Image (spheres, rainbow, N blue to C red):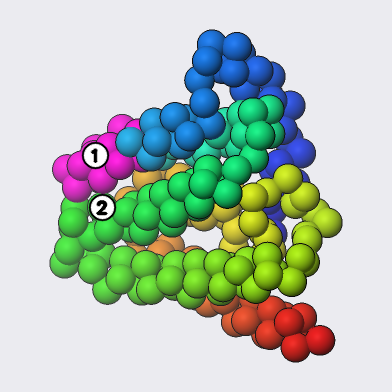
Amino acid sequence: MLDRLSIKVIRWPLAQSAKLLDQAGVTANQTTLFGFALGCLAFPALAYAHYDLALVCIVLNRICDGLDGALARIQGITDAGGFLDISLDFLFYSLIPFGFVVANPEQNAVAGAFLIFSFIGTGTSFLAFAVMAGKRGIENPVYQHKSLYYMSGLTEGTETIGCFVLLCLLPQYFAPIAIVFGIACWFTTFTRIYSGFHTLKE
């Protein structure tokens, strides 16, 4: 829901940073892989309850996720790069709640499983429609520079990262935050399935 607004805010600084990285010979795919490696470091940090360190890793991962897209727009958007980016993004999204579960399974296991389950809903509805939209040549006028159709919803990337930040700042409230955000994700899933089905049916 907030991605279209956050993109406007971060577009210019990301574009300027990407120009410098491009001049240094850094590629979009290298940035994707480096960002994913940083994001994976959040898992042991969470597992050992170092939530401040995990937050730093999460933020750095998301910065790299923005930079790889900005680099791709300079160097050329490719299907391979888009595939790598979205695949690692969804792995990262599921890794974070799993880290909280490992840190405190007695309190966080059920809520963490529910949140990961909700990510399956948002992820599959997002990717399934993107495949069908690609077959039909349907383009999203809001996100024209994405490698695949970017389907909007109540919970998008901005809301998810906001949730992760909140969880790191308030880890003792992981369960209620995860459940509330998971419910919001299911609202996103159902609206995507409904609108996606009727769009393709027409």
The vertical placement of 171 against 22, above or below, is below
Q: Is residue 157 left or right of residue 43?
A: right
Residue at image mark 2: 99
Q: Is residue 57 left or right of residue 99?
A: right
The vertical placement of 139 against 135, above or below, is above
Q: Is residue 55 among what the camera can see?
A: no
| Residue placed most toward the observer, 183 or 58 | 58
From the top left corner, tell me how far across and down residue 55 is, in percent.
Answer: 38, 38
Give amino acid for label 2.
Gly
Q: Is residue 78 among what the camera can see?
A: yes
Residue 92 is labelled as none
Residue at image mark 1: 45
Residue, x 47% and y 30% (percent of image)?
A: 31
Q: Is residue 195 left or right of residue 34?
A: right
Give amino acid for label 1.
Ala
CB of mark 1 within 8 Å of CB of mark 2?
A: yes
Graded by Cα atoms within 10 Å as few (under 14), some (14 to 19) or many (20 or more), the crowding at tag 1 reads many
From the top left corner, tell me how far across and down residue 140 is, in percent.
Answer: 78, 60
Residue, x 38% and y 39% (percent of image)?
A: 36
